[in-house]
Image (tube, rainbow, N blue to C red):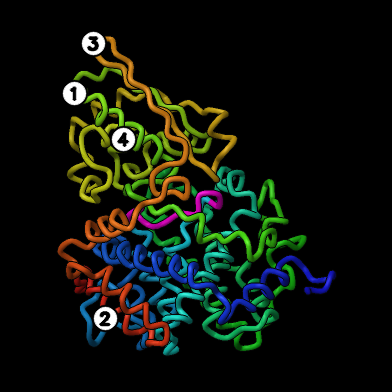
Amino acid sequence: MAPDNQTPSRRLADYLAGLSGKVEDRLLHRAADALVDTVGCIIQGAGQPWSQAAIDHALATGGDGTATVIGVAHGPGSHTTPAMAAFANGSSAHGFELDDVHEEAISHPGAVVVPAALALAEDRGATNLDLLEAILIGYEAMGRAGTAVGPAAHMLAGFHPTSMSGVFGSAAAAGRLLGFDGQTMNHAFGIAVSLASGTMEFASSGGMAKRIHAGRAAEAGLLAASLAARGVEGADDGLAGRYGFCRVFGVEPELDRLTDGLGTRWMIDEITVKPYAACSDIHPLIQATAELQAEHGFDPAQVIRIEADCPTKAATQNSMDGTTSVMAAQYSAPFNIAAALLADPRDPATYRPERIAHPALAELQAKVAPLQAAPEFDRTYAWKMGGRVRVFTTGGEVFERTVHGQKGSMHDPLSRPELDAKFERLVDGLAPVGTADAIRQALFDRHQPASRLLSNSGGGPTHTG
C-alpha cells in the first residue's frame, strides 16, 4: 500500500512501474492491436511532405543509431537514435489523421507511445513482451494525464492535448523498457512536465505544425526518461502539484483521475480506432451522413441544405472551409459532410490537394449551415462523441440521423476484419499484403526480440531525401 503522504504523481508512477511482468494477456492483445494500427498509420503517413521533412530532420541531426525510421529503404541511412526515430515515426503516425484516439482525453496515444516504445525497444534489444507492456503503460500514463487536466476546457483554451499529455505516455513507456522503479518513473514525469507543448492555432490559421506534435511528444518523453535514467531529478508532483501539469495547463482539472480505478479501468480499453482520415470529433457527423445516403439513396445534387448538431468544441474548432488546405479538409465538418456524400472519407486519397479543390465539394460544403452546439452532446463529450445531421432536398424531404458513440469507438468498436481492412487500405502498394497478420504472428512469441517486428512492416514509401 502506498504511503498516505505520497503525491498523486508518485502514486501513479509506483503503480505503473509495478506492472512489469504482471500485465494480463487480454491487455497485451489490446496493445498488439494498437501497435498494428499505428504501424499502418506510420507507413501511410511517411509519404506526406511534412512527414518527409520530419524524416529528413531526424536522419540529418540524429546521427548513427539502431532505431529504424519507417518510410526509408532498409539499409545504411535508415537508422538513427531512438529519440529521433520516435520523432520521425510519431510524425508519420500522426501525419494524416488516421491514428487512434482516447476520446475522453481528446488525444492520440498510438502516434506518441508506439513510436517511442518501438524505437527504444529496438535500441535495447527488448522482447515483444517488454514492448507490449511498455505500450500498455504508456497509454495508461498519457490517458490519465489527459483526463486529469480537464481535456475539453484544456483544448478550448488552446492547448493541443496530444502533444501536451503525450510526453507522459512516452516517458512511461520508456521507463518500462529502462526498468524504472517508481521513484525514477516519477522523476521522468517531473522532467516531462517541462517539455509539454503544442497549441491549437493550426485549427485557426493553418500550417503544418500540428503534424509533428505526436512526434515531438514521443521524442520529448524519451528525453525525459533518458535524463531520469542518468540521475536527473524531476519535481515530485509534476502532474498534480501547485505548478504541475494539470494545474498550470488545466482550466478545470480533475486530479483524482490520475489514480482513480488503477488496475480496474484501463485507458487502452477506451481507444477509438479511426475509420475516417479526419478529426475524430466530427466522425459522428460523417457516419450519420453516409448512413443517411445509404438508407435513402438520395442524389447529392438534390440537396439544398444540411444542418448539423455537435459538441461545442466541434462547433467552435471544426467549422472552417475545408477546401483551403489538406489540414483544413481533415478538420472541417462541412467539408467532411460533403465528402461523405460525394467521396469516401475512409480513403486517404479523398484529402489529396487536387481532390479537395473539386468544385462539387465546395458547392455542397456551402450548403452546410453553421454548426450548432447541442447540450446533449456536450454532456457526454468527449467520453462519448455525438452528432446529428439533417438533410433537406429539393423534393421537400428531410432526412435525419443521430450517431452517439461512433463506429470505431469503444461504444461501437471495429471488428477484426474491419481493422484488417483499414490496415490494408492504408498500406496498399506500400507494404506486402498480409503485413498485419505477419506482425501479429510475430508478437505471439513474447520472448522474440522486438526489433524483428520492423522487418515485417514493409519499407513504407521510400524516402530519398
Magenta region:
96-105
Q: Is residue 417 above or below residue 191?
A: above
Look at the numbered disc 3 and give the secondary structure of its residue: loop
Is 392 on the left or on the right of 371, as rendered?
left
Amino acid type at mark 1: Asp
Figure quadrant of residue 460:
bottom left
Look at the numbered disc 1 and give the secondary structure of its residue: loop
Label count reads 4
Residue name at image x 61 percent, y 83 percent: 180
Q: Is residue 288 above or below residue 230?
A: above
Q: Nearer the viewer, mark 1 or mark 4?
A: 1
Would residue 300 be visible to someone looking at this image?
no
Q: From mark 2 to mark 3, how far is it between C-alphas? A: 56 Å
Q: Nearer the viewer, residue 305 or 201?
A: 305
Q: From mark 2 to mark 1, how far is it between C-alphas? A: 46 Å
- Identify the residue position indicated by label 3 in the image: 395
Proximity of marks 3 and 4: CB atoms separated by less than 8 Å: no
Is 132 on the left or on the right of 288, as rendered?
right
Figure quadrant of residue 368:
top left
Amino acid type at mark 4: Phe
Who comes first in sequence, dot 2 or dot 1?
A: 1
Tag of residue 455: 2
The quarter of the rendered structure image containing the C terminus is: bottom left
Would residue 44 be visible to someone looking at this image?
yes
Query: Residue 82 location in percent, x, y?
Result: 42, 81
- Identify the residue position indicated by label 4 in the image: 335
Residue name at image x 57 percent, y 28 percent: 375
- Identify the residue position indicated by label 1 in the image: 299
Q: Nearer the viewer, residue 321 or 39?
A: 39
